[in-house]
Image (cartoon, rainbow, N blue to C red):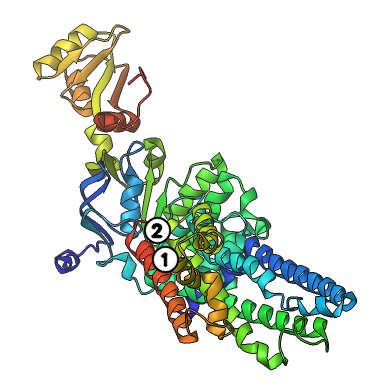
Amino acid sequence: MTDTIASEWWKVRTVRSTYWLLATVGAVFAVGCLSTVLMVADWDTASPSAKEAFPSADMSPLVLPFVQFCAGAFGAFALTSEYGSGMIRTTLTTVPRRGLLFTAKALVVAGLTVATGLVLTFAMLGGAGVIAGDRPAPIQPWPSLADGVPSALASAVVLTVTAIVGFGLGALLRSAAGALVTLTGLLFVLPVAATFLPADWSRPVGALTLNNLGPQLAGEVGDPVLSPVGAALVLGGYVLLALGAGAFSVLRRDA
Amino acid sequence: MCSSARSVSVVVVIEVRELTKRYGSALAVDRLSFTVKPGHVTGFLGPNGAGKSTTMRAVLGLDAPTSGEALINGRHYARSPHPMHEVGALLDAGAVHGGRTAANHLLCLARSNGIGRARVTAVLEQVGLGGVARKRVAGFSLGMKQRLGIAAALLGDPEVLLFDEPVNGLDPEGIRWIRELMRSLADEGRTVLVSSHLMSEMALTAHRVLVVGRGRLIVDTTIEELEQRYRRDVFVRSPDDRELARVLEAEGARVETPPDGGLSVHGLDAPRISELAFGAGILLHQLTPRSASLEDAYLELTDESVEYRAEGAAR
């Protein structure tokens, strides 16, 4: 297993897409910081009544959707780059045990996303704290930095689950285009579509989308549909479904 | 069943039994059975679409057989404990991620089996790609990719080697190189199975040939036997053709007279013809046993089973 993980890790390190995705995450974070700086500068010159109406300096609502897409794409590329080039057949001659290969790939995808996700979400937490300085709520997102930790952890979890979902889609569809289109549907179309559902449906369906599970997992939503435990269970369901369908495709179908 | 195969003195390394593979309604391999033994190069011959690649993929566990099985050392390759030390394969030279350098591509494969960087450098040197180890594979020619694929197959120093059309895209020097490589691998006691659609190539490399067409085994024989089987006639020239023909026919030979002179003798071998001529005091100017070329033999064998043929192409 260690050898297979070492091999998969080397694969991730030696393709350009990994670095492009990391660079994109960095760029989106920079944009998030810049827009927060501008917002805080605006707040400083606003009237007292306008100050009350400001949103918080937390940049994650702006940054996370982009990064989520990057995470999903990263997961998908782990398999589609092999199926697309035919490399998978070379890989499977060197690692013919497909379950082993699938597990090693999933662990590498999850591991790198957890690490990147934690660095990013804590950088956003720290960044918002630094930029908001000692200004009061509502521009100040958290009473203290420690109060923002559950939210940062929850975001990192959701990013990782998204990467696994992308990985499962890559395994199932074997094409980068197919996986990315489906991922776009899940991340960007479904949440919007949910708002068009009848009132009784739109809230519960919306609550189940990957974008909305993070705040519920952190317990940051007033009057939530799902408790943190409920949100964790739904996220677990995403992981099980993605890995189950992906494993079935990789293990059972001809390479 | 395996134990009986193993108890005989010659070890069977690759064993394909009643292998059938269907893709939808297309039958790619049809109850194919054969064995491959170590110590020499076995050629796997057939026209395009004969099922060679499908069979190789089944042997490697990449495609699941519809029925039947393909075993390496008596078990399914998917259960091999040390895959790269057991089997090295080059199926499709293009099956690489173009964004990686040659060295990194091999390192990805090597690491999965605990093989170190030194071995990667060694095989790159061995196949003549030492100078481009740090170049991206996307810029490689087909011939260079073939060499890279062969390097990958050699990484684990395997006992069994499968090469699917390895000479495609190689220049004459490269073709000679791979021919010698395959022979030396076999001479070391390894099992080498190499597919090709060119008889001429196999005649120079292989000891044994498996000829397949439309997914079925047509012939399993040695190159030598194939040449014997397709021996046609003995061509004789003599200043006294007519008398010689009479003598030979009296011995039961069938003699034809080609328009450009000489005699085409069937049913007697060259030494016997020479004896009879000598006995009858007839001078011989030429005495040539003729066999159909292996190429002709191959075309005749596979004629029925050619899947794709140009309209009106000469047979």
User: Which sits in the foreground, A225 or A116?
Assistant: A225
Image quarter (top left, top right, bottom left or bottom right) of the N terminus of chain A: bottom left
Judge from the rendering whether residue A153 lies leftward or rightward of residue B229; answer left or right: right
Q: Nearer the viewer, residue B143 or B254?
A: B143
Q: How dense is the environment of label 2, judged by Cα within 10 Å: few (below 14), some, or many (20 and up)?
A: many
Q: Residue B58: give x, y in percent of width and height.
A: 31, 55
What's the residue type where badge 1 is placed? Pro
Image vertical order of residue A39 relative to residue B128, above or below: below
Q: Nearer the viewer, residue B167 or A49?
A: A49
Tell which of A32 and B231 is nearer to you. A32
Q: Quadrant of residue B26?
A: top left
Residue B189 in the image: state x and y as whole percent.
36, 62
Q: Is residue B43 visible?
A: no
Image point (20%, 27%), residue name = B269
A252 lies left or right of A121: left
Q: In the figure, is residue B234 to the left or right of A126?
A: left
Judge whether A135 appears above or below A246 on screen: below
- The residue under the point 73% across, 71% down is A29
Q: Distance between the Cα atoms at labels 1 and 2?
A: 7 Å
Which chain contains the residue that carries disc 1?
Answer: B
Give, as a three-letter code, the residue at label 2. Answer: Leu
| Residue located 33% across and 67% down the image | B78
Q: Is residue B172 above or below residue B83?
A: above
Check disc 1 and report the residue beneath it. B158
Q: Is residue B291 above or below residue B205?
A: above
Which residue is the site of mark 2? B161
Task: Give coordinates of residue A84: x percent, y percent.
Answer: 50, 53
Q: Are marks 1 and 2 in contact (CB under 8 Å)?
A: yes
